[in-house]
Amino acid sequence: MYSTVKTAVLSGIEAIPVCVEVDISTGMPVFDMVGNITSEVREAKERVKTALHNYNVILPAKRVTINLSPADVRKNGTGFDIPIAVAILKALGIINCDIDEYMFVGELNLSGDVLPVKGILPIVFDETQSGRSKKFVVPWKNYNEAKLVPDAQIIGIKTLGDLIAILNGDKLPDIVEPACESKKDHLHYPDFKDVNGQQLLKRACETAASGMHNILLVGPPGAGKTMIAERMPSILPPLTEDEKLEVSKVYSVCGLLDNENVLLDNRPFRSPHYSVTQTALIGGGLKIMPGEISLAHKGVLFLDELVEFKGGIIDLLRAPMEDGHIRLSRGNRSIIYPADFLLFAAMNPCNCGYYPDMQRCRCTEPTLRRYFERISQPMLDRIDICVEAAAVKFDQIIDNSKNETSEQIRCRVMTCHEIQKERYKNENFSYNSGITNDKLKYYCFLGKNELSYMENMYDRLGLTARTYHKILRVARTIADMENEDNIHVRHLNEAICYRSINEKFWGSCNK
Ligand SMILES: [Zn+2]
């Protein structure tokens, strides 16, 4: 007696098809599982046997062999319980219907309840896209998540008994709708209208959002750095449908989606504490799970008190900031997770918080130096916009008459994104921050006046090629904010201001 059932396993946010084969033959009564499986998958044996027993399915005293193929793919996770149970039921002739079109995923507990699994969305998405399967049997609690994939037919099951009943019907119903409606995830981010004063910071945030530039705020405690960072997602355009799916896949792999919260409408905002471990920040661990940088995909990663992060951990962000993804390895396995985030960093200007106010700052020259050296130059090079957050003056605290709402700012940001989308439609980058060095000459063309202005600044400020390129990218964004085709001196001038602070604080370290 032999049968096969289709299922899949995840590698990162991609699904790899797996076939469960069951052979029941005469011989020593043993229950064997083979096929490059982790100990977690091996435990399926006991769960499936007991769950079947609880539905009065007793395995015959025969040799039962289960093979998960292909053998070169490592099988992990708990989603194999259901496909194994189905394959056994089929081999025993307890179910007779044609299940070849279906793909099965789900975990069982000992009493036969079907438990949700991580990563249903990417599995259903990939298998549907590739045309390998269009019909899926998934745990009830993963139903709404699976339904996000257009064209996929989903059956949500609660118990092994449900499954046997459904499979023993004359034919499988195409779709079994669950009674519960999915609520969309409507997060409301705080609004910029609550931020009084700080016009310079607001302008810097709008510029960062407009060109998707990474940003660093340096300022004393109480300058409102966190308050402003938390409002950053509220001025970014809403996610497109494709982006929503992409972000949701990461959350699915982490098991953060359920029937109530399925599709992330808003851009993610993640703010890990500086005590975060490397694994929690960039991902990894035994099962190679995504970290905060992947949960911030297409959104904002806020790192407050940047210098307090443990040595070296910040520099691990450099590769994903360049590539938009992270490659994680363990043993001979290597997995890629998306990690295309906008970095919003904040820090105090020194240990005591008052530099460069020498009346109040008690730090010595060497401690100041050590403080700034904790942020490496290659890391700073990846942050296009650096601004100083000054303490708010009293008259600004009480004056909220000039405050714009996030919606007003967001409208302008969206116009700016449209300009870039059109301009870069044939490029492999989408925003000004991503213009590659070889394309800078073309997209950030400078006229005669502008060139001589920059030549002058290059010598006067002692710019490097890298900082010069950063200034060009930011100037491109500032020009786009005015819907101006050409970059003018005023745009360059403002862009230079966004790095002068860099010079002020790090100048002494890097010379
Ligand atoms: Zn100080």
Image (tube, helix red, strand yellow):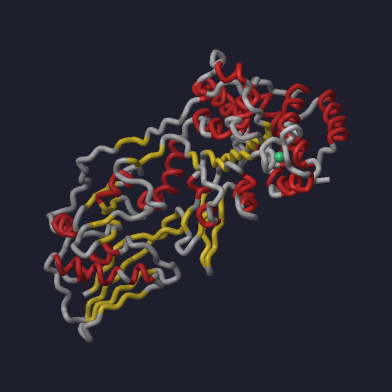
Q: How many numbered markers are drawn?
A: 0
Along the viewing direction, whichever of 340 and 425 lies nearer the viewer = 340
Q: Using the rendered image of the protein, determine whether residue 340 is visible from the camera's viewpoint.
A: yes
Does residue 107 appear to the left or right of 58 in the view shown? right
**Residue at image point 69% right, 38% down:** 349
Q: Position of residue 87 (x, y in %)?
A: 24, 67
Q: Nearer the viewer, residue 367 or 273?
A: 367
Q: Quadrant of ligand 1?
A: top right
Q: Residue at x 28, y 47 (%)?
A: 143
Identify the residue at the far bottom of this view: 28
Position of 290 relative to 424 (above/below): below
Q: Position of residue 200 (x, y in %)?
A: 65, 24
Q: Is residue 472 visible?
A: no
In percent of width and height, residue 45 lies at: 27, 71
Q: Judge from the rendering whether residue 380 lies leftward or rightward of residue 508; answer left or right.
A: left
In the image as oriented, which residue stretches furthest toward the top?
A: 401
Which quarter of the rendering shows the C terminus? top right
Q: Residue at position x 67%, y 40% from top?
A: 352
Residue 75 sits in quarter? bottom left
- Residue 313 vertical position relative to residue 38 in the rendered view, above or below: above
Q: Position of residue 31 (x, y in %)?
A: 26, 78
